[in-house]
Image (tube, rainbow, N blue to C red):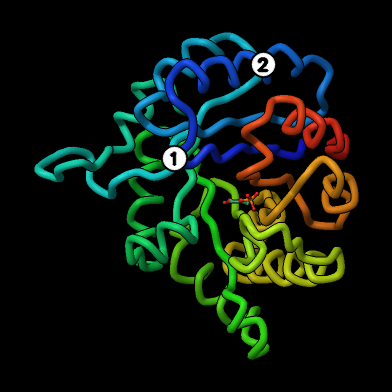
């Protein structure tokens, strides 16, 4: 399967910048041997989707509510993301787990809602620095996988060690190899053969300079990129480092 190179734009860009960034990425996407995805803020999703229409770059949301509709002030339902042009959605990002108190159970409900609306979810998991120092990284990630993923699961996982997000501290290739092998084992244990086909993205300070070595690690199915996805050239350089599928 082709690797997926996904940009999480978080709460960045005004509308004009977001559309220009999307156009810059689309302009350089020819010949890239990876699937490309950008996830702007929900407010910009329709405009970005329109700018990318018919091209090779897909659009996703950064979160969705677990209900289809209703009295949930300020929230966004999965069918709304789909209606605005999204085909993917990031769920359970550590910033949402930490800043919005999202639990595995809630993320599982959101994942079901996303799939029901025709979106492909990217479910994020990853340990804190303290958990890693305490040797609990596999236990934590194992619980997150067991709690956040519905059965069956049709989507991708992003392994994002929290201590590596936005810090410039990238996990070593050995760390990534060990955690991705563990996640693969867990997926196969929980989902049988289908677990072999689930893409496991790595996220955490991926840059053009380290992308080739991280993307070459076994069981790495792509990358989820924050800071470096806000510059078209950098994002495209990461995508060019993807392994042919
Ligand atoms: C992220 O927030 O998903 C992320 C990986 O951020 P960064 O690439 O900036 O570390």
Whole-percent x, y for residue 84 in the image: 36, 21
Of the two numbered discs 1 and 2 on the same chain, state the one appearing first in sequence: 1
Quarter of the image for residue 34 reads top right
Q: Residue at x 62, y 58 (%)?
A: 165
* Residue 130 left/right relative to 214: left
User: Does 85 appear above or below 90?
Assistant: above
In the picture, which quadrant includes the N terminus? top right
Name the element at disc 2.
helix
Per the rendering, the mark at residue 11 is 1
Q: Residue at x 45, y 51 (%)?
A: 91
* Residue 46 left/right relative to 7: left
Q: Residue at x 59, y 48 (%)?
A: 156
In-front residue for pair 24/55: 24
Whole-percent x, y for residue 115 in the image: 41, 42
Residue lying farthest bottom? 134
Per the rendering, the mark at residue 89 is none
Quarter of the image for residue 147 reads bottom left
The residue that label 2 is drawn on is: 24
Whole-percent x, y for residue 82 in the image: 38, 27
In-front residue for pair 18/37: 18
Q: Residue at x 71, y 11 (%)?
A: 27
């Amino acid at each position: 399967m082709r690797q997926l190179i996904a940009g999480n734009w978080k709460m960045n860009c005004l509308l004009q910048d977001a559309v220009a960034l999307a156009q810059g990425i689309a302009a350089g996407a020819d010949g890239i041997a990876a699937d490309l995805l950008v996830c702007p803020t929900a407010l910009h999703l329709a405009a970005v989707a329109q700018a990318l229409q018919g091209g090779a770059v897909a659009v996703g949301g950064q979160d969705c509510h677990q209900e289809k509709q209703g009295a949930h002030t300020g929230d966004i339902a999965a069918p709304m993301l789909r209606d605005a042009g999204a085909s993917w959605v990031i769920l359970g990002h550590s910033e949402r787990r930490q800043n919005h108190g999202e639990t595995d159970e809630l993320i599982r409900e959101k994942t079901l809602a996303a799939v029901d609306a025709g979106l492909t979810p990217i479910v994020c998991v990853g340990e804190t620095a303290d958990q890693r120092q305490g040797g609990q990284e596999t236990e934590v990630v194992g619980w997150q996988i067991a709690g956040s993923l519905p059965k069956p699961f049709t989507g991708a996982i992003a392994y994002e060690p929290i201590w590596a997000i936005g810090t410039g501290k990238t996990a070593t290739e050995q760390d990534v190899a060990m955690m991705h092998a563990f996640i693969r084992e867990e997926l196969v244990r929980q989902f049988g053969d289908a677990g072999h086909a689930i893409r496991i993205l790595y996220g955490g300070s991926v840059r053009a300079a380290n992308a080739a070595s991280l993307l070459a690690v076994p069981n790495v199915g792509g990358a989820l990129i924050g800071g470096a996805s806000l510059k078209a050239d950098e994002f495209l350089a990461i995508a060019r480092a993807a392994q042919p599928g």
